[in-house]
Structures are given as C-alpha cells and as structure tokens.
Amino acid sequence: MAWFKRSKENISIESQKRDTPEGLWKKCPACGEILHIQTLKENLSVCSKCNYHFRIGSEEYFSFLLDDKSFKEYDAKMISKDFLNFVDTKKYKDRIREAIKSTGLKDAIRYGTATINKIPVSIACMDFEFIGGSIGSVVGEKIARAADLALNKKIPLIIISSSGGARMMEAAYSLMQLAKTSSRLNRLAKAKVPYISILTDPTTGGASASFSMLGDIHIAEPGALIGFAGPRVIKQTIKKELPEGFQKAETVLEKGFIDLVVHRKEIRQTLTRLLNFIK
C-alpha cells in the first residue's frame, strides 16, 4: 500500500509538471527568488525581492521611456557586412544570420527620434542579445547617424549602452567605429547639443572606452558592470583578488566616473527633469 501511495504521488507530481506551461517563471541570479514572468515584466524586469535589474533590450526600454507611439526608427534594415570573410568556429555570415533569426533584430542597436514627456530627442539603444551588443560597422554607423540627427534638429541625444565591446569578427573595421562615434559626439559638444549616456549591464570594452563615457551626463542602472576589461580578465592579469563591488555602478559613482545611479522605474522621470533643465 505504501508503494502504491508513493506511485500515485509521483504520477500526480508528473501530471502537474506537464500541466504547467514552460517559460512562466524566471530565477533571479542575485537572490534566487523565483519570479513569475508576467509580474517581472510589469515590474520593468526588476526583481521584486532584491531589486536586481535583469538585462532588457531596446524594445523594452523604448516601451517605458518614450511617449506612446512617438518613436520613429531610422535605418531599421541596415545589416552588417562580412568584409573579411571571417571564420572562427563558424562563418561570421552565419553568426549574423543566426542572431537575426533568434532576436528578430537586424543588429545590436536601434535608433531614431522620439519624445519623452513631449520633449523631442534623438535616441539609440543597444541590444546585448545580438552578438553580445558588440560594436561593428552597423552599430558605429547608427550611433553616428543618431548624433547627426541630434545635431541637425538641435535636440538632445540619448544613448543606452549594453555592450561587451568591439566586434572582433570585423577587426579594424570595428575599431574604426570608436573614432567615428567619438568625432561625431565632439561635434555635438562644440554645438552645445546635450548628450545623456545611460549605462546598463554590461557597459565594457570599446563602448566604455568611447561613446558611453563621453556624455555630458552619465546615468547608470543599479548594479551595472561598468569598465573596460571585465573583472575576470583583470583578476587573471594582476593575480589578485578584486575589491567587493569592483566595477559595479555604485563603486564607479563613488569614484566620480558617473553622475547618477538611477532605478529603472525612475529613469523616465529623471530624464524628464534633466531634459527640462538643459533644453
């Protein structure tokens, strides 16, 4: 009878597993809390228990930052070219094709014009899901064009960064984007057109070495990794343990490299205050 009872319990458990749709729950990597996907989305992908900020993409950022239906995207069909016929474990052409298929994006950034509480802006947002938010020729070109839009229309520029650095499958073509974007942002500075940089997890490598840290104002999300080389690489290089919180947004703020650390729920309100102040 005990065996029969245990068997019934096992069957019941298996039945519950089959009846529970997959993809409804997500585990917080910071505190281990199991979060319902819909509730998590309603909370702007922030853990309700520990305030861990999950990585999100351009679609999500635009949905809560921008006025409804105000976003006009430019160059939405621009796709990276395999200049070098590059191959590592697979062809770069295949990587691009797979990334487009899996993410629904054309590359690691989208840009255009929009309004935030009726204030017009030029805005670009990176997508880490697309080959690690790596900076290739398309990313560099779109940032340059977003800056040109801001300059020509005399409206503030906002760039939301989420990147692991240069896209090495494009080699020197990728590295050239850093000079291109920096020079465009220099034009904005000379014309006194404001540029607000929002740093999310992670902002590293070529992004942090160029456009992400060239803003007039730098805002970071809580807990975001911000630096050039990642902590693992630095630790392996110097052969020493790193301080607690090393390269986290709060430490970077303390050291004076950024201006604000702002909860995701408060970024739209913060941007509105800043834009009203500097316009």
Image (cartoon, rainbow, N blue to C red):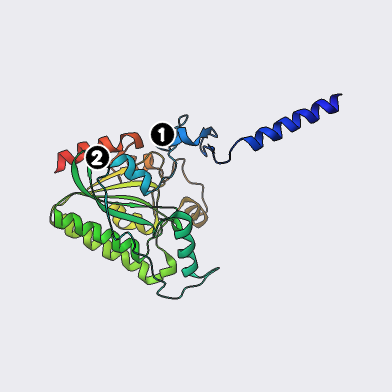
Secondary structure of residue under mark 1: helix
Quadrant holding the N terminus: top right
In this view, the residue in front, 35 or 231, is: 35
Q: Going from the N terminus, do you reach mark 1 or mark 2 first?
A: 1
Is there CB contact under 8 Å for labels 1 and 2? no
Q: Which residue is mark 1?
A: 42
**Which image quarter: residue 276?**
top left
- Label 1 crowding class (10 Å Cα cut-off): few <14, some 14-19, many 20+? few
Q: Is residue 160 visible?
A: yes
Left or right relative to 182: residue 94: right
Do we see residue 255 in this rendering? no
Name the amino acid, label 1: Glu
Q: Which mark is residue 271?
A: 2
Residue 128 horizontal/vertical position (percent): 42, 52
State the residue lying farthest toward the top.
1
Seen at 28% across and 65% down, the residue is 179
Disc 2 residue type (three-letter): Leu
Spot the residue most to the right.
1
